[in-house]
């Protein structure tokens, strides 16, 4: 299945952040989270990789169909430390663009600890 995520590489920034290589497992989780938000990937396989609050936020948007006809704008990913990755993207909602943020933290494995859509209340 081809999505907007497949066509456009993310902008990986490095200004003022840790310059370690971006872990492929973490990048995969970022992409999978945005694909699920847009309704292009199953939601429940992500559950073990998400903190409860982040999963509930994602599930509420998916269940409401908030972004089922949306497209993803520019995706930016940065690694502020060896154990954290932050990604931001613009998501279309009708005639508006909303900001979506995802944070991954690593303990023994990568976990999506935060997901928020700014300007759109989840149900």
Image (spheres, rainbow, N blue to C red):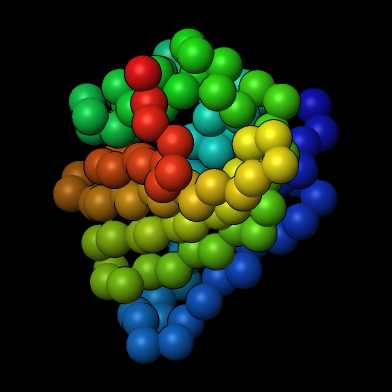
Residue 24 shows up from this direction: no
User: How far across and how far down the image is residue 45, in percent?
Assistant: 45, 18
Which residue corresponds to the image point at 38% horizontal and 31% vertical from the top-left?
121
Left or right of 88, for residue 56 = left
Compared to residue 51, the image places residue 68 above or below, namely above
Left or right of 50, for residue 74 = right
Farthest residue, direction bottom:
16
User: How far across and how far down the image is residue 26, in percent?
Assistant: 43, 50
Observer-nearest residue: 15 or 123? 123
User: How far across and how far down the image is residue 8, in percent?
Assistant: 76, 56
Compared to residue 19, the image places residue 68 above or below, namely above
Residue 101 shows up from this direction: yes
User: How far across and how far down the image is residue 90, in percent?
Assistant: 59, 52
Compared to residue 122, the image places residue 86 above or below, namely below
Question: In which quadrant is the N terminus drawn?
Answer: top right
The answer to which quarter of the image holds residue 76 is: bottom right
């Amino acid at each position: 299945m081809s999505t907007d995520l497949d066509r456009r590489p993310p902008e990986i920034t490095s200004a003022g952040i840790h310059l370690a290589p971006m872990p492929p497992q973490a990048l995969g989780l970022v992409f999978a989270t945005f694909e699920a938000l847009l309704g292009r990937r199953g939601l429940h396989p992500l559950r073990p990789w998400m903190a409860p609050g982040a999963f509930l936020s994602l599930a509420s948007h998916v269940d409401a169909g908030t972004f089922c006809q949306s497209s993803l704008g520019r995706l930016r990913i940065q690694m502020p430390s060896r154990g954290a990755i932050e990604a931001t993207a613009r998501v279309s909602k009708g005639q508006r663009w909303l900001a979506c943020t995802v944070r991954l933290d690593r303990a023994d494995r990568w976990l999506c600890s935060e997901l928020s859509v700014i300007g759109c209340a989840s149900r």
